Amino acid sequence: MSKRQWPFLLGGLLVALLLAGVVSNYASSHPDGLDSSLLKGCTVNADDEITGGSCPAQEAKDHELADSPLADYGVRGIGNDFVSTGLSGVLGVLLTFAFGAGLFWLARRRTPATTATQAAPATTADPADEAATPSTGSR
């Protein structure tokens, strides 16, 4: 990687960390399209708990990884929601970046790419070739 690409890469990583660590805390807490479509037919209270009706969301079960350290957009064990959500986002960005960097490291070529001047074999004048071709110049 050239030296000119490092500032771009680090700048992108910094923007991603800022978005994940700070801006993600200001995302809407209202249900997204999938959640709201699953609630059609049910009545819900202010805490988004189903209080009546019939809808597919009543059949929902917890995910197998619901007890994992980064479940529900937060870090388990941290009481402050703002810090928990921000830290979860930052860890997610760093893990994704590390995974992607590892894949690129594995996929890269082990030898440096050759340029066109290095790849072309050097040509030498062969006297036999010169004798076989007629001369176009006058003497």
Image (cartoon, rainbow, N blue to C red):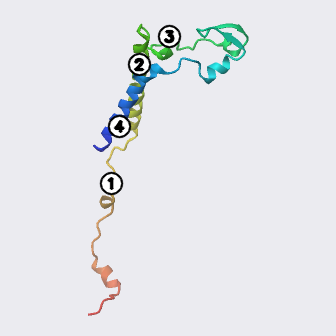
- Amino acid bearing label 3: Asp
| Residue placed under numbered mark 1 in the picture | 114
Q: CA distance from mark 2 to mark 3?
A: 19 Å
Q: CA distance from mark 1 to mark 2?
A: 44 Å
Provide the secondary structure element on which disc 4 rests: helix
Q: Is residue 30 left or right of residue 38?
A: left
Quarter of the rendering occupied by the C terminus: bottom left
Provide the secondary structure element on which disc 2 rests: helix
Residue 36 drawn above or below residue 11: above
| Residue placed under numbered mark 3 in the picture | 67
Provide the secondary structure element on which disc 3 rests: loop
Residues at circles 2 and 3 in contact by the CB criterion of under 8 Å: no
Which of discs 3 and 4 lies nearer the camera? The answer is 4
| Residue placed under numbered mark 4 in the picture | 9
**Residue 131: % across, % down:** 31, 84
Quarter of the rendering occupied by the N terminus: top left
Is disc 2 surrounded by few (<14), some (14 to 19) or many (20+) residues within 10 Å?
Answer: many
Mark 4 and mark 1 lie on one chain; the one further toward the N terminus is 4
| Residue under the point 33% across and 34% down | 10
Residues at circles 3 and 1 in contact by the CB criterion of under 8 Å: no
Which of discs 1 and 2 lies nearer the camera? The answer is 2
Q: CA distance from mark 3 to mark 1?
A: 51 Å
| Residue placed under numbered mark 2 in the picture | 86
Residue 2 numbered mark, or none? none
Q: CA distance from mark 4 to mark 1?
A: 24 Å
Which of discs 2 and 3 lies nearer the camera? The answer is 2
Which of discs 3 and 1 lies nearer the camera? The answer is 3
**Residue 11: % across, % down:** 34, 35
